[in-house]
Each structure stands twice: as C-alpha cells, then as structure tokens.
Amino acid sequence: MELKQAIGSRRTIRFFKPWRPVEKAKIQVILEAANRSSRSMNADYVKAIVVNRDELSPELRDTLRNPTTSLSLDLAPTYIMWFINLNYPDGTKERLKELVDHDIQVASQGWSHAYVDETIQRTVIEKITGDESRLQWMGAIESGQAIAQAMLAAVDEGLGCALHNFADAGIREPLGVPDHWRRAWIMLLGYPLEEPEAGGQRPRRPLSENFFWGDAHTPFEDDPEVTEQLKQDGMIQTPSPLPWRRDEMRAINRMLGLAD
Amino acid sequence: MDAEQVKLEPTVRRWASSARFDDDPRELNARAELLLAFCEFANTAPAAIIEGCLLADADAAVGGQREISIRGRREMNDQIEAWSDQLVGTEFMRITAGNTIRGFLVHNGILIQGHPAL
C-alpha cells in the first residue's frame, strides 16, 4: 500500500473480528514503525507492552475497562499499551555524541563532543527534567509521533486499529510497569469486522480553516488539481455518511447482541 | 405499571425515537416488555433508571447539563447483569436483553457499553 493510501484509509475501527488473531510478524512491523519515528535527542520516548486479549486473565482484562473502551476490549484480539517514558532524557549525552561521531549532528550546525560534554546538561537537559510540564509535553508529542506511525503500519498490514483511553491501575503491578512509564493510549488491533471504510472518511474542516500561508491571518488555499490527485491516490476518500452504514451497524449489533 | 404505560413514558418515547423503532410496533412492544421486566426485577421505573445513573447534587446540573454518576452507572450495570443472568433462554438472548436495557440508557444520555455475545 502506498503511503497516501494508508493515510487515507486509516480509521478508528470499533468492531473487530474477535476470532481472528493478529500475526506476530505484523506486530513486529508495527513496533518497528514506531521505533523509526522522528524523536528529538534520539531518545526513547515511548514504551509499549503487547498483549493478546486471550492471554490476559478475565480479571486483569476487566481492570482495563472504562465506559468508552469496554466493548472494543472484548472484540480486539490484541492490545498494545503505549506509555510515555518519563526517563527519556537519561543517556542523552551518549546518544548525541554517537550522532556527532556518525556525522549526523555536525559542526556546521553547532554540534561537538565539547558541547555535549560540557554545556548541554545545564543548557538543555536540566531545563527539561526540571520542568514537569515541559517533560510531559515533549514526551507526549514524541510518543504521539511513534504511535501515529504504528497506526499507519497497522493499516498497511491490512489491520484495523483504534486508540483508546484505558485504566492502567490494575495492570501496572502484574505486568511490571515501571513508575516512570506514564499511560498514553491503548491501541486495539485486529481484523475489522466492520468494512475497513468504517462508515467513510470522517468530516474534516477545509485546509484553509486550520492552515495558513505566511502569517496566521492568511488561509492556505488548496489547489483543486492537487485535491483531485489525492483522491486518485487514496488520501482523500469517500466521506461519511456512507448510504449503507446504518444497515451495517444494525447487522453487526444484531450479530453480537448489542444495543442499537 | 404495565407495558402500555411504559410505552408512554417520556424516556421510552425518547429511546424509541432516537433508536428509530418508534414506527415499528412489534419492536416497541418487545423492548417495552423487556424494560418492564427489568423495572420489576430492580423495583424501579424507567425515569428512575436514568436518574440513578446521574448525580443528584443540584450543583451537578449546570447549563442544562447533568453529570453521570460513576457509581450509579456501575451499580445499574450490575443490576442489568444480574437481571439478564437470571433470565431463561440462550446466552445470546440473555446478553441481548441486557444490552437492550443499556440501549435505553444510551438513548437517554447515559454512556454505557455492554459486552458482545461471542
């Protein structure tokens, strides 16, 4: 699948085939996609624990539930619990010197062993570690990039996925989650029971509403030819509502004995 | 209260309208019977089911908005579970009946999820 198609095809999938497991090889692809994400200081911002639903005891699975996540936890065969590693600044100096040695961080842009050894600690690292909001903000942004890449990899592998909030208090000790891992999202993975279009592409506001050119007052103007090309490439797809969506939901609800 | 009275309850009419079965008398009858059975089991009434899932505190009602009671909703869910467990019938039928009552809650503004019949 081409990148534009993967971006356009990603949906929050809410109904998975509970009987079809996710191949471990596909999980590896997803994790590698996360591992390849952009990250400042080449730090490890994100941690993840992969578990198959049926390998968790019912009691432990119940601890993950919250009002908006309960049903999908029963349907998705695999969960990836994403955490923000709040110890991400650890080892920064060593990693940055490695990048200097590899001529990735170069002198023409101000990088040297001396900078890393002698001034970065006070100038940068302690500014982050000493400011809880900055620590969390950076951790969240960089983890989000990794999770986003993981989602696109899942789509590319023919899987459905969804990010949800989850209750982590009950699983932290049994799964050995360290205190410095802060709960991010739980990614539910599986083969979609609903059509992969999942009701059609979600309504989005036009680019001009959120993106600007030159200053914050001049809306970005999209080019209709580019828009047309993106439709052909699959990034822009048929929008919701799809005419058969209500019947699809009714059929799935009846199949699973759910409220409609 | 009988099923005919249940069908006239504003919360039930709202449910029927929102879930689009108000023009289907058989569906309306079937769901009203289930709701009535649950009300008898829990010794409650349709409007009280909804109220039981909301905070009663006057401060919880601001600008026309009410706040869901986490404990109230959990207790109601437990009652639904207990009711559906004691019904006679297949597991699918019992789970569907419980989720029907949850649907009544959902269409009256209480976010709640059941579990699927697998």
Image (cartoon, rainbow, N blue to C red):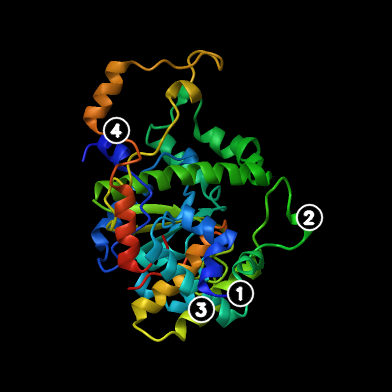
> Residue type at mark 4?
Met
> Residue type at mark 2?
Asp
Q: Quadrant of residue B51?
A: bottom right
Front disc: 2 or 3: 3
**SS under mark 1:** helix
Residue A66 visible to the viewer: no
Q: Chain of mark 1?
A: B
Front disc: 1 or 3: 3
Where is residue A234? Give x, y as percent.
Answer: 25, 34
* N-terminal label among 1 and 3: 3
**SS under mark 3:** helix
For marks 2 and 3, give the CA distance. Answer: 33 Å
**Residue for badge 4:** A235
**Residue for badge 1:** B75
> Which mark, residue B114?
none
Dividing the image into 4 quarters, which one contains the N terminus of chain B? bottom right
For marks 2 and 4, give the CA distance. Answer: 47 Å
Residue located 36% across and 65% down the image = A75
**Residue for badge 3:** B37
> Which mark, residue B59?
2
Dividing the image into 4 quarters, which one contains the C terminus of chain B? bottom left
